[in-house]
Amino acid sequence: MRTFLIALTLALAMPTLAADRDSALIHNPMLWADCPDPDVIRVGDTYYMVTTTMHLMPGAPVMASKDLKNWETVGYIFDRLTDSPKYDLKEGTVYGRGQWATSLKYHDGRFWALLAPNEAGPMGDTYIFTAPKAEGPWTIHARLRHFHDATLFFDDDGTPYVFFGTGEMCQLTRDLKGVVDGSLRHYFQREADERGLLEGTRVIKHRGTYYAQLISHVYAPGRHRREVCYRTKDLNGKWEKNVILESDFGGFSYLAQGTIVDSENGDWYGIMFQDRGGVGRVLTLSPVRWIDDWPMLGDEHGKVPDVVRPIVSGQPKKTIVCSDDFNLPLQSEGAGGRLLGLHWQWNHNPINAAWSLSERPGYLRLKTSRVVDNLYLAPNTLTQRMFGPTCSGVVCIDYSRMKDGDCAGFCAFNGDSGVLTLKKNGKTVFLEMSEQKVSLSDREKAVTNVDDKMIEGVSLTKLAPKAKQVWLRIDGDFRPGHGDAANFYYSLDGQEWKQIGSKNYRCNFDYRRFFMGSKFAIFNYATKKTGGYIDVDEFKLL
């Protein structure tokens, strides 16, 4: 009987044990959110990663993890960029431009970062930043000529190099403030069917061999987007080439661009991004098998696996998208009040005098500060990533101090946006769900038109004459085959919800405009006169 009871107990426990093991695994996508152009390094027992966030500020987020599963944002390389009024939504915009493909390194006890905005002229000059810790503070060390999709590399003797573009490289001076004369050269020539750029260079040195990894776009039958690797034992010598990953994954097309990194135990892993429509470019994790001294990514079939065993176990759950009641212990007092959590980014440079966490403790106050025509020119729009496979975000907004002509609300923000807008018209507040689509000029990224199609509207003043606040909710569904759908709701009590507007609004990804995945976004702007404000009680992930 005792043996039977033990067996029965173990049998009953098996589903729980299996679920625990499953939850400990790293499921791909490793980060199902917009995190393109990753660079990942390990310093001791901690992995650090930077990805592209372009026109969002602060920019160049630094994320940290102990296990390559649980990631949190620990800092930003810069608070704002100031090379042009376009970063302030004046005289154009920097939608889809700004910070691109940052390279992260650790050398001689300091962190180093190199990035080049995707712009022509001085706005595109390369930045080199440095910091004593990954969390910062980061300072600008140097400005150099433009290096497209570049990586910084320090050789064993400390000599610095930049690898960039399609097979180009040069040596930097020891102080990293200039290019060594005569050092610029091509270290490989692309193949005939690689008519696109070979981009996203990442360089490591392993056992005396240099490895340069790049994404390759090919246009030949049976050839796909892939990650290629060039290697050499002599930087001035001949480089060999191999394809190290050519894999589709999860019902989406082929993926590439990223890097490889080792663990403390000597295992290696590859982090590559995959385009996944409206949610953006997500990150996948693969084991690396060293075969004939090539770092081959994927499982034994060369494919990105569904799951990867954990690097270490027992790490606390952390995320890069977070709920916020704006009442948590915050870092310090700063411009505009206490500092926001690191999970938030502004659309373009913020106007610090127009937001506060201190004027009404426990609330985020967003003030109007400039009269503008539309959402895409509105300063101080606050964002976090939407994410897969599904997500739900809720905001509670006190709209009692809006002024005539003010527009405030919550949206799935992108070049095509699904928008919930509170509109103040005289003494009446309307809630509208609309589909908004921005047109941008090619060069200045100036807003030339916004197609604003109102789908459904209600008068909150009539529904609840004495109400001062409303809850707005957006549900996103980014599962394969579900159409990158967003649905929109409102509530007068935070409990009962009513759907409004488009059913299964399609979240789009458009590389010609924003070039990023959809964002949860909170906004407030004036169309007639400034001085109004909203108070946001919370942002909650359901």
Image: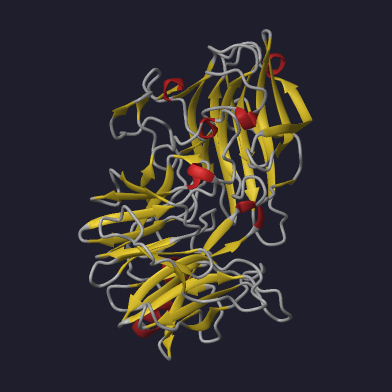
**Vertical order, 106 against 509 (above or below):** below
Residue most extreme to the top? 427
Which residue is pictured at 60% across the width and 66% down the height?
197
Q: Nearer the viewer, residue 66 or 96?
A: 96
Q: Is residue 26 visible?
A: no
Residue most extreme to the left? 109
In the image, taking residue 452 as reference, residue 199 lies left or right, namely: left
What's the colour scheme?
Answer: secondary structure
Q: Nearer the viewer, residue 390 or 83?
A: 83
**Vertical order, 312 against 371 (above or below):** below
User: Which x, y percent locates residue 479?
Assistant: 65, 59
**Vertical order, 39 against 394 (above or below):** below
In the image, taking residue 296 as reference, residue 106 lies left or right, namely: left
Q: Nearer the viewer, residue 196 or 26?
A: 196
Which residue is pictured at 37% across the width and 30% down the height?
327
User: Which x, y percent locates residue 519?
Assistant: 58, 43
Q: Is residue 444 visible?
A: yes
User: Which x, y percent locates residue 275?
Assistant: 62, 61
**Vertical order, 494 against 276 (above or below):** above
Assign the N terminus to one quadrant of the image: bottom left
Question: Tag count in the figure?
Answer: 0
Q: Quadrant of residue 435?
A: top right
Residue most extreme to the bottom? 292
User: Which x, y percent locates residue 68?
Assistant: 39, 64
